[in-house]
Image (cartoon, grey):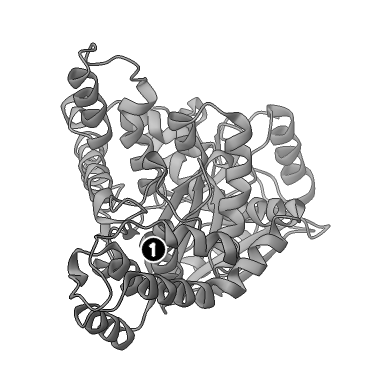
């Protein structure tokens, strides 16, 4: 059985060691496991909540994309995309907003923290708090639920986001499901070894505290950053407490269990802080050196990054567009064509029609091609090969069955669900051209109110 994993990083700065050890590395490792379908994204809509510096966001998006790829993410084996390239996500956000309780959002850590800070400073409780900050857990829920992720790798401090996505998804299922669960319940995937990494001052490594160690800093900068990590005043030869030391926590995140055990024992035996920092630097620098070089090469090739992300967005929308069509119907936003009477049409030979079927990552897929071999419609991932065979046989016989216009996307339905879709056109003109092509070149459409 295929398991779907999803995670993302907000594009407000340069990724640091905490991002890598707590999210990027475990996510990439998970993507290489058998039976896994992985979705990884740049959370650039989330960035707008925290940052109003457009140049910083633009630079960060490139840095985060280059980081994932340099760290070993294979865009041919995963779906890697920018959040802002998937229009279905903000639309789903609104559908979820209409079922999410305000009381639930009141309990979000970021909002509560902002309120507590305002009150401590004698300000109005909601001073400076935007609706983006207040409702961003809904956008995060849409990120997760749009692709029905089974597991979401997060740090322990991010666990609430997954729990809130579950709560909101359950509420939608209850209100609109009518016996069907549109959303499954995602599980948080936490690497307990490195759930939270300390920064230079011992607090959680975070851009908010300005205490981060950049992931792909040059060797000289990395050494200087590690030298700034706060330690106590114990001298060389004096026993140290590894379990309260930021150095040991960082070392353990990058070392093998055996090497971490030796470092732990050396600190207890009196290893000096200077030597301890030197060993930490050498460990991290050696492990990240090759990735660092690839990262800086990718930053000089923005077109390569853009092509990779557009390819990922296309794959993501092949999942998101038909699913959102189902959700729109669930809440009552059906096309009026859905109610038009169906009249049997006289079929004519499918002169240029062809269908290609294939299997990928344990699922079945098919594409409908025109006479010029251009792809007209693409299927979703189907778990049942017999179901796909039945659909393909009907198409080859010239019977496309139940076609519907969902916005500017043409969708093929089979037994109550969307199974294939066209591209999403920018306007009605593109959709009309596709409909005319189907009618003229392939077969006579059933009369479903799909006007040309």
Circle 1 Cα neighbour tier, 10 Å, few/some/many (<14 / 14–19 / ≥20): some
Q: Tag 1, which secondary structure?
A: strand
Picture coordinates of residue 435 (x, y %)?
A: 70, 39
Picture coordinates of residue 278 (x, y %)?
A: 44, 73
Which of the 4 quarters of the picture holds residue 122?
top left
Residue found at x 58% / y 63%: 220
In the rendered image of this protein, does residue 350 appear above or below residue 160?
Answer: below
Q: Is residue 447 visible?
A: no
From the viewer's side, name the closer residue of 154 and 55: 55
Residue found at x 31% / y 36%: 137
Looking at this rendering, what residue extends furthest in the right direction?
372
- Please indicate whether residue 222 sits to the left or right of residue 138 in the image: right
Which of the 4 quarters of the picture holds residue 233?
bottom left
Q: Is residue 413 visible?
A: yes
Residue found at x 27% / y 55%: 186
Picture coordinates of residue 312 (x, y %)?
A: 60, 55
From the viewer's side, name the closer residue of 278 and 349: 278
From the viewer's side, name the closer residue of 31 and 199: 199
Q: Which residue is mark 1?
A: 4
- Please indicate whether residue 403 sits to the left or right of residue 148 in the image: right
Quarter that holds the N terminus: bottom left
């Amino acid at each position: 059985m295929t398991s779907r994993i999803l995670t993302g990083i907000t594009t407000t700065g340069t990724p640091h060691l905490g991002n890598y050890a707590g999210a990027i590395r475990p996510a990439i490792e998970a993507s290489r496991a058998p039976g896994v379908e992985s979705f990884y994204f740049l959370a650039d809509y989330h960035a707008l909540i925290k940052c109003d510096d457009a140049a910083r966001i633009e630079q960060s998006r490139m840095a985060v994309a280059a980081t994932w790829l340099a760290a070993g993410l294979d865009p041919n084996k995963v779906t890697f995309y920018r959040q802002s390239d998937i229009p279905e996500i903000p639309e789903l956000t609104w559908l979820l907003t209409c079922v999410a309780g305000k009381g639930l959002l009141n309990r979000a850590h970021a909002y509560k923290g902002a309120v507590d800070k305002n009150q401590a400073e004698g300000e109005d409780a909601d001073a400076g708090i935007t609706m983006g900050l207040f409702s961003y857990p809904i956008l995060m829920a849409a990120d997760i639920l749009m692709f029905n992720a089974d597991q979401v790798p997060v740090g322990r401090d991010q666990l609430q986001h997954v729990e809130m996505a579950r709560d909101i998804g359950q509420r939608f299922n209850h209100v609109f499901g009518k016996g069907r669960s549109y959303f499954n319940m995602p599980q948080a995937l936490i690497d307990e070894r490195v759930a939270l990494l300390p920064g230079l001052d011992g607090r959680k490594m975070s851009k908010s505290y300005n205490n981060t160690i950049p992931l792909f800093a040059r060797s000289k900068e990395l050494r200087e950053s590690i030298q700034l990590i706060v330690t106590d005043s114990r001298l060389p030869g004096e026993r140290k407490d590894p379990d309260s030391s930021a150095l040991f926590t960082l070392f353990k995140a990058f070392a093998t269990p055996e090497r971490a055990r030796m470092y732990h024992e050396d600190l207890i035996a009196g290893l000096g802080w200077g030597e301890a920092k030197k060993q930490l630097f050498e460990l991290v620098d050696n492990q990240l050196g090759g990735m660092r070089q690839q990262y800086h090469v990718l930053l000089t090739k923005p077109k390569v990054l853009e092509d990779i992300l557009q390819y990922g967005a296309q794959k993501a929308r092949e999942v998101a567009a038909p699913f959102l069509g189902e959700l729109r119907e669930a809440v009552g936003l059906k096309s009026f064509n859905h109610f038009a009477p169906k009249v049997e049409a006289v079929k004519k030979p499918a002169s240029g029609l062809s269908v290609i079927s294939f299997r990928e990552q344990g699922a079945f897929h098919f594409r409908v091609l025109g006479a010029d071999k251009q792809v007209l419609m693409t299927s979703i991932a189907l778990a049942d090969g017999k179901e796909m065979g039945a659909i393909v046989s009907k198409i080859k016989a010239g019977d496309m069955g139940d076609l519907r216009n969902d916005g500017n996307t043409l969708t093929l339905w089979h037994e109550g669900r969307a199974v294939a879709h066209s591209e999403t056109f920018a306007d009605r003109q593109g959709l009309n051209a596709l409909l005319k092509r189907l009618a003229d070149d392939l077969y006579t459409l059933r009369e479903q109110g799909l006007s040309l």
